[in-house]
């Protein structure tokens, strides 16, 4: 399939790196293609980033048949563009597609389209360490129909957003709040897919956490409300004594690519790593015994996010001394230096764009 390209008349300008936040600055162009049952995915094109028309009856607005991905393009010191495990993101998009009855995309084709788009938008990639170009591929159901079934037509987009350093003032520990009344995902549900509804379901608890001064929600399992699942848009790790523990993927946890990368590095470094059930009581017990050394989240946006406080009902624990732990820093440095091309890509995670 040939990708038609329509360029903007007047390109926009990227704000200075220090003025970049997250998800507000969009680049000049986007990639779009359409799906119809009889044609498959078709009409791939790069065109100006702009609003588009959909019927108010479009199924995505009513029944949430929508999936997305999140990854980043990084500028190396020699001003080359590179991606971190991008094919894993598109493979996961296809897993989400299968989970929500959405037609799969051709990973090789979409990778080529993304590279073409990135080359066109290369001036939108900031260069300061910690900044990047956030890539948001997504698919929405577009049939104008109010009955409940899977749509027959879809749109696939890739939009790009210049983003600032997540930690402008250095890695700072976050406070997280355990929700006891809400759950994010249930066994047999869609928690392991990157679908819009999971985020809609998380908003209420997120607001409660924020009102009490906590940055994110730590979710427990839906059945027993006992075992830890994940945090907001991150997976979670606990260093208990010498053991690095992260919840095993039960079907209601999002299989994070950063999570897999942390596990791989930890094994390579000879750490004892366990993917297993870990209850909130075990975490509080370990803390009481002085055995809870570190807690940190993992995800594309922050890479590694140290956790400094956990609140569970009436109980609060503080981890570390307001500074990020050594282990969290070690993973952060190892992952970011591979992503920004300042260290050797020993794991074969990097895909070069130009
Ligand atoms: C995207 C996401 C993550 C992190 O996945 P990465 O691939 O590491 O960015 C974790 N939890 C949820 C709910 C997510 O949507």
Image: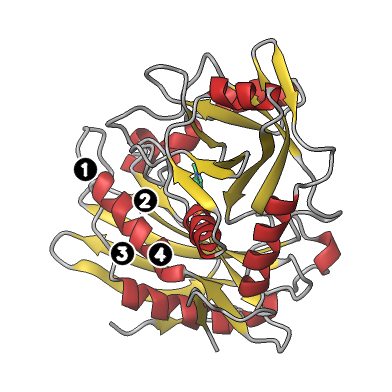
* Sequence-first disc among 1 and 2: 2
Q: Is residue 267 above or below residue 253?
A: below
Q: CA distance from mark 3 to mark 1?
A: 16 Å
Could you tell me residue 155's position as x and y percent? 35, 58
Q: Residue at x 57, y 36 (%)?
A: 231
User: Mark on residue 34?
Assistant: 3
Q: Secondary structure at mark 2?
A: strand
Could you tell me residue 149's position as x and y percent? 19, 37
Q: Secondary structure at mark 3?
A: strand
Name the residue tied to disc 4: 88
Q: CA distance from mark 1 to mark 4?
A: 25 Å
In this picture, residue 32 sits left or right of residue 170: left
Could you tell me residue 139's position as x and y percent? 37, 55
| Residue density around tag 3, few if under 14, some if 14–19, many if 20 or more, within 10 Å | some
Name the residue tied to disc 2: 140
* Sequence-first disc among 2 and 3: 3
Q: Secondary structure at mark 4?
A: helix
Contact between labelled residues 3 and 2, with CB atoms less than 8 Å apart: no
Label 4 or label 3, whichever lies nearer to me, is 4
* Sequence-first disc among 4 and 2: 4
Q: Quadrant of the N terminus?
A: bottom left
Q: Residue at x 74, y 38 (%)?
A: 174
Q: CA distance from mark 4 to mark 2?
A: 20 Å
Residue 54 shows in the view: no
| Residue density around tag 2, few if under 14, some if 14–19, many if 20 or more, within 10 Å | many
**Label 4, ligand 1: CB separation under 8 Å:** yes
Q: Nearer the viewer, residue 226 or 286?
A: 286
Could you tell me residue 240's position as x and y percent? 61, 37
Label 4 or label 2, whichever lies nearer to me, is 4
In this picture, residue 246 sits left or right of residue 209: left
């Amino acid at each position: 399939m040939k990708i038609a390209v329509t360029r903007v008349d007047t390109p926009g300008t990227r704000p200075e790196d220090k003025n970049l936040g997250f998800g507000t600055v969009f680049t000049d162009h986007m990639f779009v293609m359409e799906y119809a049952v009889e044609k498959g995915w078709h009409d791939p094109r790069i065109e100006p980033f702009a609003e588009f028309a959909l019927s108010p009856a479009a199924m995505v607005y009513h029944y949430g048949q929508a999936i997305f991905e999140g990854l980043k393009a990084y500028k190396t010191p020699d001003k080359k563009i590179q991606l971190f495990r991008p094919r894993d993101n598109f493979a996961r998009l296809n897993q989400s597609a299968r989970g929500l009855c959405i037609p799969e995309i051709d990973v090789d084709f979409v990778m080529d389209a993304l590279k073409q788009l990135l080359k066109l938008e290369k001036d939108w990639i900031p260069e300061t360490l910690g900044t990047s170009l956030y890539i948001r591929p997504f698919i929405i159901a577009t049939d104008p129909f109010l009955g409940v079934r899977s749509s027959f037509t879809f749109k696939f987009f890739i939009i790009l957003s210049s983003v600032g350093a997540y930690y402008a003032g250095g890695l700072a520990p976050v406070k997280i709040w355990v929700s006891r009344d809400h759950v994010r995902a249930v066994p047999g549900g869609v928690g392991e897919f990157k679908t819009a509804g999971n985020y809609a379901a998380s908003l209420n608890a997120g607001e409660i956490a924020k009102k009490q001064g906590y940055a994110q929600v730590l979710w427990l399992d839906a059945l027993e409300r006992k075992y830890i699942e994940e945090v907001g848009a991150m997976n979670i790790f606990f260093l208990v004594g010498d053991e690095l523990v992260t919840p095993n993927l039960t079907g209601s946890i999002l299989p994070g690519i950063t999570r897999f990368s942390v596990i791989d590095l930890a094994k390579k470094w000879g750490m004892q790593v366990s993917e297993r059930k870990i209850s909130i009581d075990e975490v509080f017990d370990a803390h009481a015994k002085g055995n809870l050394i570190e807690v940190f989240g993992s995800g594309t946006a922050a890479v590694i996010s140290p956790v400094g406080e956990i609140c569970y009902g009436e109980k609060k624990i503080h981890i570390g001394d307001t500074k990020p732990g050594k282990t969290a820093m070690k993973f952060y440095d190892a992952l970011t230096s591979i992503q920004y091309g300042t260290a050797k890509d020993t794991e074969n995670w990097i895909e070069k764009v130009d």
